[in-house]
């Protein structure tokens, strides 16, 4: 999978930009604050229709402007043009000029694996961040996943509402709670199965990725879920047993909305035992494993974005990684320190020099 060209209109600090990319390595360099991350953020948003560093789409629109447009041509087995248009009212996405009304039909088309310096915070962040990571990755792989997730969240909300209703009105019927519980289990189980399968696949690669590049040590991800190894009937019985407790609490106490990932290095939780470096390496290994999973599932390598490369890794590790990345993986690297990039790498790359709001192909 390759993005061959990108056009931006009023995106972040860019008024108008048109670029053609290299099929393999693209290096984007320039001083702090000039717009390097903005550029890779645009590629990411072209794929996922949202940013990795703001949940408010409006931040992507250039200051004092009303809308932004990101447009790119992406080659997989076919060549297609993609557009994401954002304005104050909302967003529109198009493929080959046709509006796509369901976001889930759009976001599984362009696959991105992103690594950015903030990513290692994932281990110490609350579980919701790790679920978010899972959701972003899986939604690129499985179209229906987001639909199940939206349905689950809708039922969860209704169920919590009804639990509070039951608390106020003790005589209200539990039949409706049964119905909501069954619905919750139905969607929750689908999500659980997909998450389980995804993590299994990651686990087949992550350990090799980890110690091929970095050091010895066994890395594995543990998927922690209330739904672990339980069928729908068993789950229903557990919920029923907890009804009274849940009514008092006014919320659903079990479910995939509590799922978590634990990264185990040599059988120890890396969040509690791992060094800073080991955590950086672990998240990197996860991303590399993901590249393989995407390729296996989709028959195409995803686009790889390494934002602020040197703040994430030292020179030696970068060398090892680049050796592993074959030319089939289109890669975008941003850095302030071009001089630290290896000669042979430079000679194979297309360079983009960024000055504030402006990009020139070198
Ligand atoms: N909506 C916006 N409109 C105009 N300018 C914006 C907008 N959002 C961000 N900026 C500007 O973009 C710049 C930041 O760009 P970016 O994060 O891409 O920098 P960078 O080159 O990656 O820097 P660093 O090397 O420090 O990571 C800031 O100067 C900021 O003011
Ligand atoms: Mg940056």
Image: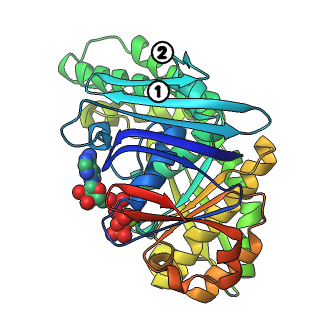
Q: Residue at x 18, y 20 (%)?
A: 168
Q: Is residue 139 left or right of residue 31?
A: right
Q: CA distance from mark 2 to mark 1?
A: 18 Å
Quick one: SS at disc 2? helix
Closer mark to the observer between disc 2 and disc 1: 1
- Looking at the image, residue 132 sits to the left or right of residue 80; the answer is left
Q: Is 318 situated above or below 196?
A: below
**Among the 4 quarters of the image, the one containing residue 127:** bottom left
Q: Report which quarter residue 80 is drawn in.
A: top right
Is 118 on the left-hand or right-hand side of 230? left
Regarding residue 218, the answer to whether it shows in the image is: no
The residue lying toward the viewer, choosing from 70 and 126, is 70
Helix, strand or loop at mark 1: helix
Lower sequence index among marks 2 and 1: 1
Q: Please name the residue that numbered disc 1 is placed on.
A: 150
Q: Which residue is mark 2?
A: 179
What residue appears at the point 67 percent right and 56 percent down from the top-left corner? 22
Task: Indicate the position of residue 349 as horizontal and vertical percent values.
Answer: 66, 68
- The total of numbered circles placed on residues is 2
The quadrant of the rendering that contains the C terminus is bottom right
Q: Which residue is at a point 52% across and 20% down the rendered structure image? A: 183
Task: Give how far across and how far down residue 84 sits, in percent.
Answer: 46, 31
Q: Is residue 203 above or below residue 259?
A: below
């Amino acid at each position: 999978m390759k993005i061959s060209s990108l056009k931006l209109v009023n995106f972040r600090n860019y008024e108008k930009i048109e670029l053609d990319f290299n099929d393999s390595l693209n290096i984007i360099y320039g001083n702090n604050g000039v717009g390097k991350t903005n550029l890779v953020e645009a590629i990411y948003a072209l794929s996922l229709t949202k940013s990795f560093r703001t949940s408010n789409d409006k931040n992507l629109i250039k200051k004092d402007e009303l809308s932004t447009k990101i447009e790119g041509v992406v080659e997989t087995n076919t060549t297609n043009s993609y557009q994401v248009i954002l304005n104050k009212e909302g967003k529109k996405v198009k493929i080959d000029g046709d509006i796509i009304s369901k976001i889930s039909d759009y976001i599984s088309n362009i696959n991105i694996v992103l690594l950015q310096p903030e990513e290692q915070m994932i281990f110490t962040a609350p579980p919701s961040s790790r679920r978010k990571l899972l959701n972003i990755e899986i939604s690129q792989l499985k179209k229906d996943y987001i639909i199940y997730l939206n349905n689950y969240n809708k039922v969860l909300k209704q169920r919590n509402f009804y639990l509070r209703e039951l608390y106020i009105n003790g005589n209200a019927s539990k039949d409706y709670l049964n119905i909501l519980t069954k619905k919750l289990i139905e969607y929750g189980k689908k999500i659980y199965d997909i998450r389980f399968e995804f993590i299994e696949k990651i686990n087949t690669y992550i350990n090799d990725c980890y110690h091929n590049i970095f050091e010895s040590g066994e890395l594995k991800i543990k998927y922690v879920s209330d739904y672990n190894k339980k069928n729908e009937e068993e789950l229903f019985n557990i919920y029923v047993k907890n009804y009274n407790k849940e009514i008092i609490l006014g919320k659903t106490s079990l479910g995939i909305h509590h799922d978590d990932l634990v990264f185990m290095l040599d059988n120890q939780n890396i969040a509690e035992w791992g060094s800073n470096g080991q955590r950086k390496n672990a998240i990197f290994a996860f991303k590399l494993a993901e590249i393989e999973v995407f390729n296996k599932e989709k028959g195409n390598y995803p686009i790889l974005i390494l934002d602020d490369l040197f703040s994430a890794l030292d020179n030696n590790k970068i060398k090892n990684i680049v050796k592993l990345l074959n030319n089939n993986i289109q890669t975008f690297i941003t850095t302030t320190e071009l001089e630290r990039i290896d000669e042979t790498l430079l000679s194979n790359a297309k360079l983009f020099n960024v000055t504030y709001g402006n990009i020139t192909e070198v």
